[in-house]
Image (cartoon, rainbow, N blue to C red):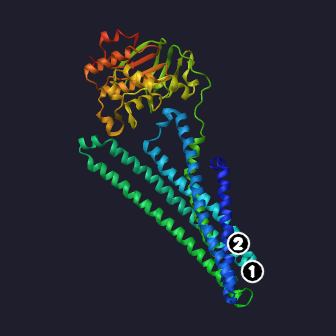
């Protein structure tokens, strides 16, 4: 994480300077309180007033510096976290769809929100706090040495106890936080299953089963949260208690030196204040260090994701004929598409037909790298697609799935992906979307008001707006009424200037004759018309 800190050197410098200024004010306040005590003992009114004014001035300065320090600390944490997120988003995008979908949705939700929150609070924020408080401790300890060398030696010996105790707490804290993070991910997965499969659960009358599963994970989560919170409290209170004992020992030593005449009474006030400014931050520093160490697993997971280089092709994309050469692809242990070969002319429109489960979608997904090849190769313009980088491939080959995902915004914004609206409007009209629909809100519950035909037309308009020279439509007419399906199919057949593949269940001879070619995979679909 050091590289993210280095990006904000200037802000970090201001943070350190603020911490130094605050530490100086604390030292001055401690000595001013000592002078005020001596002035009271010596009955020097002028010195008493002067030292009192100095105390008030130091307190006012400390207040201003404290607010500034918090502002700088939060700004540093936020900027570093945003930089981590930016690199993480870029790394996930560069890996491609096939790699992305190896993990569950709950994994990414926990990563982007749960783990990121822990990283900001328990690493970045704790790091800045430990730096600031360490500076404070160093200045106050140096000032304590000027008051009494003996008292400084006693402090140096006693302060080693909290450091030794912190090692005993470290493993417990790390273990408790890791257990909570893992259980939180499992709960999120169960909740996603309940929401995503809600209709299925109700229709099959299995609500009690899934609620029981969810409650079981929730109880386990509460147990892990309780364990984490108790561990945090035990570590915090234990460290505080040990520090208080050490501080009492040092204060007792200072009182003894006053009693035997080695120190003035005002020195007791000064040393007490300095010890308070030393032990309290020292306790907090130990807690911060434990928090930082507890994030080791999260930091390693994020750095592995960010640092792992994605597969990078070295050749540029060249539009041309598409050739499948003895292609084998599938999922898990099963090969769906086996030893498949064909050639598609550039700019042609092709239908892909076959029975369900024979590999039509696998063919399309393999063409855009969503499905890894197990044998053979696919070339476009004579270039193997595996030699082309995934971002370059995605810019030139577009896969349009059956389902259409809508983002929060208008229909037109969804088509343009929040970019230039003029060409998007033109392509939307080309996709037979009515003008009045373009300003309607989409996404979330509002997207449910759109018909299946309108959703499909939005996908087509998106495809027309893209820079891709190859368009793959996966059963665009699926689930539509016959009239709407016929309109969609006719619309797709009239796309010009691009190579178009349409996966379809329509075996009508007159319909298929309008294509430049028909690719049949497997045996005929006996259920099709």
Q: Which residue is rendered at x = 71% and y = 78% of the image?
A: 154
Work out which residue is located at the far front of the displayed protein and give it: 46
353 vs 7, nearest the viewer: 7
Please provide percent x and percent y for residue 244. Answer: 59, 77
Q: Does 26 appear above or below 361?
A: below
Mark number, residue 107: none
Q: Is residue 242 left or right of residue 340?
A: right
Q: Quadrant of the C terminus?
A: top left
- Which circle, 1 or 2, is nearer the viewer? 2
Q: Quadrant of residue 427?
A: top left
Please provide percent x and percent y for residue 344. Answer: 47, 13
Mark number, residue 150: 1
**Which badge, 1 or 2, is on the more N-terminal residue?**
2
Q: Quadrant of residue 494?
A: top left
272 vs 155, nearest the viewer: 272
- Residue of label 2: 141
The answer to whether one can see residue 470 in this image is yes
Q: Residues within 10 Å of mark 1 (few under 14, many from 20)?
A: some
Q: Does 160 appear above or below 316?
A: below
Q: Which residue is rendered at x = 38% and y = 23% of the image?
A: 428
Q: Does 136 appear above or below 209?
A: below
């Amino acid at each position: 994480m050091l590289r993210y800190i280095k990006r904000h050197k200037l802000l970090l410098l201001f943070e350190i300077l603020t911490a130094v200024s605050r530490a100086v004010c604390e030292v001055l306040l401690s000595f001013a309180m000592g002078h005020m005590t001596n002035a009271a003992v010596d009955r020097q009114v002028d010195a008493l007033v002067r030292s009192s004014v100095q105390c008030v001035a130091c307190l006012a300065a400390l207040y201003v510096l404290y607010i500034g320090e918090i502002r700088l600390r939060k700004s540093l944490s936020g900027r570093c976290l945003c930089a981590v997120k930016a690199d993480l988003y870029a790394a996930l995008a560069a890996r491609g769809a096939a790699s992305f979908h190896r993990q569950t949705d709950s994994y990414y939700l926990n990563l982007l929100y749960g783990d990121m929150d822990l990283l900001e609070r328990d690493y970045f924020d704790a790091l800045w706090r430990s730096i600031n408080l360490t500076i404070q401790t160093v200045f106050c300890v140096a000032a304590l040495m000027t008051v009494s060398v003996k008292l400084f030696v006693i402090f140096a010996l006693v302060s080693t106890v909290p450091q030794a105790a912190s090692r005993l707490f470290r493993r417990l804290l790390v273990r408790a936080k890791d257990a909570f993070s893992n259980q939180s991910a499992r709960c999120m997965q169960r909740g996603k299953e309940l929401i995503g499969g809600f209709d299925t659960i109700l229709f099959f009358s299995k609500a009690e089963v899934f609620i029981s599963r969810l409650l079981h994970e929730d109880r386990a989560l509460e147990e892990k949260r309780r364990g984490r919170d108790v561990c945090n409290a035990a570590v915090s209170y234990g460290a505080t208690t040990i520090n208080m004992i050490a501080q009492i020992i040092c204060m007792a030593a200072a009182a003894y030196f006053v009693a035997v005449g080695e120190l003035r009474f005002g020195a007791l006030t000064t040393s007490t204040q300095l010890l308070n400014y030393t032990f309290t931050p020292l306790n907090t520093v130990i807690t911060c260090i434990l928090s930082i160490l507890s994030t080791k697993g999260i930091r390693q997971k994020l750095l592995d994701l960010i640092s792992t280089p994605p597969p990078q092709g070295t050749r540029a994309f060249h539009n041309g004929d598409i050739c499948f050469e003895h292609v084998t692809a599938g999922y898990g242990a099963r090969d769906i598409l086996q030893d498949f070969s064909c050639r598609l002319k550039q700019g042609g429109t092709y239908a892909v037909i076959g029975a369900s489960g024979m590999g039509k979608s696998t063919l399309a997904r393999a063409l855009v790298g969503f499905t890894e090849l197990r044998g053979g190769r696919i070339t476009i313009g004579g270039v193997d697609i595996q030699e082309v980088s995934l971002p370059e491939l995605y810019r030139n080959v577009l896969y349009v799935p059956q389902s259409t995902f809508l983002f929060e915004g208008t229909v037109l914004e969804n088509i343009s992906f929040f970019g230039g609206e003029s060409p998007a409007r033109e392509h939307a009209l080309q996709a037979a979307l009515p003008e009045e629909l373009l300003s309607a809100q989409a996404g979330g519950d509002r997207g449910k008001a759109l018909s299946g035909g309108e959703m499909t037309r939005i996908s087509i308009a998106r495809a027309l707006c893209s820079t891709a020279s190859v368009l793959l439509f996966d059963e665009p007419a699926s689930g539509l009424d016959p009239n709407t399906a016929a309109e969609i199919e006719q619309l797709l057949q009239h796309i010009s200037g691009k190579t178009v593949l349409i996966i379809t269940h329509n075996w009508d001879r007159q319909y298929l004759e309008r294509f430049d070619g028909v690719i049949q995979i497997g045996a005929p679909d006996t259920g099709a018309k």
